[in-house]
Structures are given as structure tokens and as C-alpha cells.
Image (cartoon, rainbow, N blue to C red):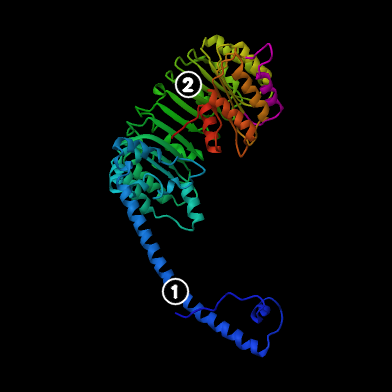
């Protein structure tokens, strides 16, 4: 082992002078300095060799440590409570891992991606695989959206194999005796694989409990084969792009003996179709008034209805339409109230436009007087007219829930918030237990004014506020001070909702308007 030079250089020595100055060395100095450098080189070579040996040893030790850590973790996993979760609880947990049908954060829902549940669950462990395969509810929902498939194939420059899709769908069909089918054709893709897929699904139509069907005129699906073969179908959603795509649809669902919920989107084409109206308990339709009238007159058992009138100049009926069991109703035009009688109605949602307030209030009075209904919830969508809203709250003291879905946060919203704030001597609608506000565009009200109003109603002794919500779009959120105040109200007991994302916001608004939900 070579010795290194003595690093201690004595002050006053010639070596010290050379180290601490820029003085040039003499010839005799050069010989000495060269000997010092040689001693350093020998010692450095030895040290580098020793370091390499130690690095190799350290690497071996680290590799051994990593292997032991992995082995230890694997053994700890054996003792994990997850391995002992009862099967019935795992079933519930697995169900909650299913991705939503339509969600901006999950655009590959139709790709049968093995990174998604339920397919992912079959690759975790033999037990999870056995449980997931034996749980029909995980496999009952089959979503095939060819518009999404088309977008994915373009973005990835890869067209998926029809045979692979058919094979995966067959596997799902085998694993569930009840099926919930979501099939959406797309005219810009080859029709043959779409027809093949629908034919495969149709072979098992007697097991369908739900069907959401999007038709395209260039994709000739055989719907006549469904006629009289849908004994289990309970929920149905239909939409199409052209009238030619639905000619065979007209009566193929008429004999569906279990059908109780129907939704149809027919905004422009006004295609006539037949449904088992007497047994329906819920329907949603975007279409002409004539179609709505025909369904309403033949559906005495409706409990919920979403009536969206498309391009109709006049709403009228030869006879008053009486719906004895209707409890929840959305209408896109206040005129519809003039032709209805609903003695059991509890919740009403109405779309309003600027200037419609006075006539709407008159129609609402007539409807309630005629129906003698226990109306407790009112929802206004569109442009809020504060005067009309306050008049309604004063006219109908039975109202305990107010829902406002607004297109913008203009001055009228500020006026409404100000009107709802308790004064020193008066309070508008002290009976309100729920106050729910939402925006369909990327806009929000004055957060401070909203919080002050909410806090004042919560603290007022003669107010009964229990539930509140503010539904916004985009990245709008209150500052930290307002947010802390809202959270404090929640801690005190107020049931307050502030969604975290647009998807959640849209879900709330859809529910307030009694729209179709599938998840």
C-alpha cells in the first residue's frame, strides 16, 4: 500500500511559499514538486482501486437489500386484510371501480381496455379473477360506441380488430344473465362490423334489461328481429340522425312487457313510433308536442316526465291531460302547464326566457289551482327574473325547495341573491329548506354576496335552511377566505354541495331537470 505525501506544509518553508504565492519555482524546486506529485499519483491510484472495490460491494449489498425488501413486502402482503375481505364486500368494491359510461376523463370506455375494470380485476390474483368473473353485475353493462372507436383509431393510427371486439363482447355476454346494452352506430365507419356487433347482441335480446341505442342512417341495423323478443327490457333510450334510420323502429318496442322508462331524442325529424305507454312510469322526450301529447294521453301511470318541445309553434290539446301519479316534471315551455292536471305533483322544473315571467306566473297559478297539488319544489332554468321568482315563493308557501339553473351571472343573479338575503325585519320565503343554484356556462356569481346571503339565512332564527348548493363550470372557485367560510357552515351542519369538476356539475344539473342517468 503506497504511502501518500505529508499534507502538512510548515509555514515559512520554501514549499509553503510556493503554495501560497505566484512565485515561479527554481530548478531545485521543480524536482521536489515532481516528487510530491508522484507520491500523490501513487496514493490516488490505490484509493481509486479501493473505491471501485467498495462500490462493487455496495452495489451487491443494495441489490441484496432490494431483493429482501421485495421478498418482505410479498410476505407482508400474505397477511394483508385485503386477502380476507368477504366475497360479498369485494363484489360491492368491484362494482364501484367500473368506469362511467360517458366521462371526459375516460374517453376509451368503448375500447374494452384491459387497464379498466372489470377486465383489470381478472389480472390481480386468482381469487379476484374468480370472484370478478362470477359476479354478473360487473359484466352486464356492454358499451359499444363506434364514434369513440373511430376517434381512437384515428389518434392511434390503428383500426381495432372486429374479431377481437366480438370475442370480448361474447365473453361479457357469457358472464351475465342480464344485459344492459349501450350501442351507438357511426355513419363514417364501415357498416359491416357494426352490423355484426348488433346482430351478436340481438341474439341475446331476451336478456336485455336496458337499451341505449344510437342509430345512423347509413348503418342498416335489423330492428324487426327485436319485435316480441324483449320480455326483460325495463329502460330504453333512442336517438337517431335521420328518419331513414328508424323506419323499422316504429313498433318493435310496443310489446316490451316490462318497459317502464323511455327516453327519446327526436329534435328535428319527428318520426312517429309506438310505445307501451300505459305501463310507463318515466319518460323523457325531445320532440314535437304532438308526440308528447300522444304519449301523455296514454300514460296514466307516469311518475316522472321530462318534456322538451322541439320547434313547435303552438301547444294545445283538445282535452285536459290528467296525470294522477305524476310527482316530478320538467317542461321546456310554460305553456304546457295550461293543458295538464297533476294532483300528486311535488316537483316542477321549467325553462324560462326573458319576458316570460308574468305569463308563466299566471299559468302556474292556474295549474296549481286546477291540480290542487302539494308542490314543494320549483326549479327555474334560463334567465332568472327575480320579481317572478319572489312572487312565486310568496304565492305558494308550500314551496320548501328553490332551484335556479342560470345561463350567466349577470345583474339579475346579483339582484336575486340580494333579495334572498334576510333583512332586519323581513325574510323572503323563510320556509325554504333547500336553496340550490347552478350555472350552465363558465360563469359564477359574486362569491362574497352569495356567502353573506347563505350565512345570513343559516343564522336567522326564523329561517329553516338545511341544504344548499352552488354548481359552477370551469375553474371558477371562491378565494380561500370565502371557501373557509363555506366549509365552516358545512361543519356547523349545513348540507352544502360544491362540485369539484365539470362532470360532477353536469350530473347535478341533469338530475335537477329529471334527465336520464345510466350510472
Residue placed furthest toward the bottom: 27
* In the image, residue 518 lies in the stretch drawn in magenta: no
| Residue 162 at x, y percent in the picture | 38, 53
Q: Residue 139: which quarter of the image?
A: top left
For label 2, the SS is helix
Horizontally, is 233 left or right of 430 in the view? Answer: left
Q: Is residue 213 in sight in this rendering?
A: yes
Front disc: 2 or 1: 1
Q: Earlier in the sequence, mark 2 or mark 1?
A: 1
Residue 397 point in image, percent of width and height: 58, 11
User: Magenta segment range?
Assistant: 406-428
Residue 140 or residue 90, whichever sits in front: 90
Residue 387 screen position, x and y as percent: 68, 18
| Separation (CA) of disc 2 from disc 1 | 92 Å
Label for residue 174? none
Q: Which residue is mark 2?
A: 296
Where residue 243 sits: x, y (%)?
50, 38
Give the residue at x 48% y 75%.
Answer: 48
Query: Pointer 1: what residue?
Result: 50
Inspect this view and state whether residue 495 appears.
no
Residue 414 falls inside the magenta stretch: yes
Crowd around label 2: few <14 · some 14–19 · many ≥20 (10 Å):
many
Q: Which quadrant: the C terminus? A: top left
**Image point (38%, 47%), residue name:** 197
Amino acid at each position: 500500500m503506497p504511502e501518500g505525501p505529508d499534507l502538512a506544509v510548515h509555514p515559512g518553508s520554501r514549499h509553503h511559499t510556493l503554495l501560497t504565492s505566484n512565485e515561479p519555482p527554481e530548478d531545485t524546486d521543480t524536482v521536489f514538486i515532481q516528487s510530491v506529485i508522484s507520491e500523490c499519483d501513487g496514493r490516488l491510484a490505490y484509493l481509486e482501486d479501493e473505491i471501485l472495490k467498495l462500490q462493487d460491494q455496495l452495489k451487491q449489498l443494495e441489490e441484496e437489500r432490494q431483493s429482501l425488501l421485495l421478498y418482505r413486502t410479498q410476505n407482508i402482503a400474505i397477511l394483508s386484510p385485503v386477502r380476507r375481505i368477504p366475497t360479498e364486500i369485494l363484489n360491492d368494491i368491484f362494482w364501484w371501480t367500473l368506469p362511467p359510461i360517458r366521462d371526459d376523463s375516460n374517453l376509451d370506455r368503448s375500447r374494452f381496455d384491459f387497464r379498466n375494470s372489470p377486465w383489470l380485476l381478472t389480472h390481480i390474483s386468482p381469487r379476484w379473477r374468480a370472484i370478478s368473473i362470477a359476479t354478473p353485475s360487473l359484466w352486464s353493462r356492454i358499451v359499444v360506441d363506434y364514434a369513440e372507436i373511430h376517434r381512437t383509431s384515428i389518434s392511434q393510427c390503428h383500426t381495432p380488430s372486429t374479431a377481437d371486439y366480438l370475442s370480448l363482447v361474447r365473453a361479457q355476454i357469457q358472464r351475465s344473465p342480464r344485459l344492459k346494452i349501450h350501442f351507438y352506430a357511426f355513419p363514417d365507419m364501415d357498416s359491416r362490423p357494426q352490423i355484426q356487433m348488433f346482430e351478436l347482441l340481438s341474439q341475446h335480446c331476451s336478456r336485455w334489461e336496458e337499451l341505449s341505442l344510437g342509430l345512423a342512417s347509413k348503418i342498416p341495423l335489423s330492428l324487426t328481429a327485436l319485435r316480441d323478443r324483449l320480455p326483460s327490457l325495463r329502460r330504453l333510450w333512442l336517438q337517431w340522425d335521420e328518419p331513414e334510420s328508424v323506419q323499422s323502429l316504429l313498433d318493435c318496442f310496443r310489446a316490451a312487457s316490462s318497459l317502464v322508462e323511455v327516453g327519446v331524442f327526436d329534435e328535428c325529424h319527428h318520426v312517429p313510433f309506438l310505445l307501451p305507454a300505459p305501463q310507463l312510469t318515466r319518460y323523457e322526450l325531445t320532440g314535437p308536442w304532438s308526440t308528447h301529447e300522444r304519449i301523455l294521453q296514454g300514460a296514466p301511470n307516469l311518475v316522472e316526465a321530462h318534456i322538451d318541445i322541439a320547434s313547435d309553434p303552438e301547444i294545445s290539446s283538445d282535452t285536459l291531460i290528467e296525470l294522477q301519479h305524476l310527482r316530478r316534471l320538467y317542461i321546456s315551455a310554460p305553456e304546457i302547464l295550461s293543458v295538464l292536471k297533476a294532483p300528486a305533483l311535488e316537483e316542477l322544473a321549467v325553462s324560462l326566457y326573458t319576458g316570460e315571467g308574468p305569463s308563466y306566473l299566471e299559468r302556474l297559478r292556474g295549474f296549481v289551482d286546477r291540480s290542487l297539488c302539494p308542490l314543494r319544489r320549483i326549479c327555474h332554468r334560463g334567465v332568472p327574473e327575480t320579481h317572478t321568482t319572489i312572487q312565486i315563493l310568496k304565492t305558494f308557501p308550500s314551496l320548501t325547495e328553490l332551484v335556479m339553473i342560470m345561463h350567466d351571472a349577470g345583474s339579475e343573479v346579483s339582484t336575486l341573491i340580494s333579495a334572498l338575503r334576510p333583512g332586519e325585519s323581513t325574510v323572503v320565503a323563510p320556509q325554504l329548506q333547500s336553496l340550490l343554484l347552478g350555472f350552465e356556462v363558465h360563469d359564477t356569481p359574486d362569491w362574497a354576496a352569495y356567502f353573506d346571503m347563505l350565512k345570513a339565512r343559516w343564522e336567522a332564527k326564523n329561517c329553516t335552511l338545511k341544504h344548499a348548493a352552488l354548481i359552477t363550470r370551469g375553474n371558477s372557485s371562491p378565494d380561500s377566505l370565502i371557501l373557509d367560510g363555506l366549509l365552516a357552515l358545512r361543519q356547523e351542519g349545513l348540507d352544502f354541495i360544491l362540485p369539484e369538476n365539470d362532470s360532477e356539475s353536469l350530473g347535478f344539473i341533469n338530475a335537477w331537470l329529471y334527465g336520464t342517468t345510466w350510472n
